[in-house]
Image: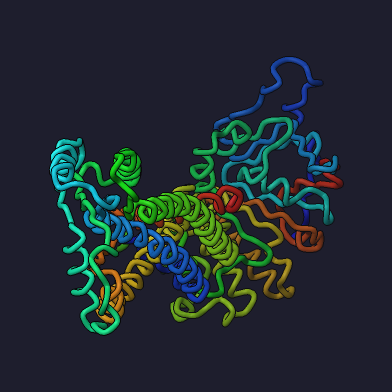
Amino acid sequence: MTGNITGPSREYGIFIKGGKGNPHEGLNEASSMIQFFQVYKTYPGNIKALANISFKIEKGEFVFVTGPSGAGKTTLLRLIIRVERPDQGEILVNKRNVSRLKNSQIPLLRREVGFVFQDFKLLNNKTVYDNIALVLRALGYNKKEIPKRVRQVLKVVGLEEWVLKQPPLKLSGGEQQRVAIARALANTPSIILADEPTGNLDPELTVEIMDLLEKVNQLGTTVVVATHNTSLVAQYTKRIIPLYRGEMVE
Amino acid sequence: MGALSLVRRTFGVMKENGPTHVLSIGTIAISFFLFAAFLLLPLNFASFLEAWEKKVQIILYLKDGVEAKRILQLTGELQREEGIREVSYVSQRKAMESFERDLAGYGGVLKGLKEEVFPASFEIQMDERFRTPERIRALAARLGNIKEVEEVQYGGVWLERFSIFLYTLKWGLWILGGVLVVIIVSVTANTVRLTLYNKKSEIEILKLVGATDTFVKLPFYLEGGLQGFLGAAGSILLLLVLFHFFSLKVSPYVSLYFGQLRLSFLPPNMIGWILGIGVASGLLGGLLSLRKAARI
């Protein structure tokens, strides 16, 4: 597989237009799942996290966000689910303007997004079943529907039923990440955001997890994977949003 | 979220942090126990005071040689006085006889005492509404001005001091109550904060998958409220047990010195208030700890 590295200005020139005319032109296109328009984010102490970020991710696309540590990958993902708020600029996620979302609407946005972490963030005092069911309970799923749904997502991520009664720590790293992906998929989100999902895994398991994310993408879910691993990115023919010190680079 | 599921989640949260919860419920129970025990004091002292007030009388000791005609006149005047219900004259002879009766066992000592040693007196019972320390004092002062009266005696001084003591106790209770609420709020807030810390990952996951604030926070509010309720209920139970023990074992001995002692426990409305304060303080504790936490 070969990398298909695309420069942001070439791909998303439509947003810029020399800063003239309607600044929001190009936003809210029907097929777009995620759109960033001239987004800036600075942390206290004047630490620049992101500057002038504009891009568009289409519905059903698989995109890598790459860059070394401190490039702003995690901040970018956190902005999508409104864990962070941009200082400037607009962010649209599935036609919702995230930057202007009321607090009461944030849960609705997050229900459309599944998040996968590098360290899995599984609850080790609960079984695999409870880890997945917890999400469904929180989202008000019917009591009878929950076991069915848990088994469905478990099948999607290629895990067998016996793991359901196990605590996560009894599973291998790859299996734990599969459980985390199952949990992210439980609510059938439109988008999966994965922050260094293979960061804690060996190369063999890395391929397994990436193949799984590709499979999820083929089922119609938009997938955004943030990673610093350029060799991993090079193995897949996917679009890339490259970041360096908070800015998009060629 | 169904009520049953909410209760299950709340108990789940509490179970995972069991020993800490037992400790904080115990602390709340002890704090409430002290408060409730102090509440019992003025409650029972007030009835004690009431019983004593009924027994209070003014005694007017007369000067020697007051004529029988004047005695009769004075009796009439006293009976007409506002606030006086009953007036009885105790002659010198009667006083000596009463003294002899009271000290019957010491007959030898009394030999040779003559009735002239004992002053004649008026024993005055007051109307019910005149049995307050202030009114007794005022009446005694007025009666002391009668020319034939040598000395006035009444239990009012003692009653007055006791009444001041009760007043101070009641104010002390308010202060104690305030301190207690601060203790309960801080104990619950810290326990809930500890639970929040233990459940940090779970809360983070729940918030990231789109659980509402109410879904995430409600069990923690309830945890605080439940802690306050259990602590308050525990304190009342403990107090009830000790109260019965005191009534059965100690009260008869106390009655020997202070007359028939009728002890009463906290009335239902007061118990309701204690439980209510427990729940409210617990909820406040939960609210305070959640205000800063779980901000994702």
Q: Between B202 and B182, which is closer to the camera in this rendering?
A: B182
Q: Is residue A141 visible?
A: no
Percent coordinates x, y for residue A116 in the rendering: 61, 59
Residue A145: x %, y % from top left = 33, 61
Q: Residue at x 64, y 46 (%)?
A: A83
Residue at point 29% right, 64% down?
B117
Position of A19 with respect to A198 (left or right) is: right
What is the tally of numbered marks visible in this picture? 0
Image coords of residue B290 (percent x, y): 55, 52
Q: Quadrant of the N terminus of chain A?
A: bottom right
In this rendering, would A245 be left or right of B191? right
**In the visual, does A80 lie left or right of A20?**
left
Q: Quadrant of residue B196?
A: bottom right
Question: Looking at the image, can residue A21 be seen?
Answer: yes
Location of residue A154 in the rendering, given as x and y in whole percent from the top left corner: 47, 69
| In this rendering, position of residue B41 left or right of residue B65 | right
Nearer the observer, A65 or B147 = B147
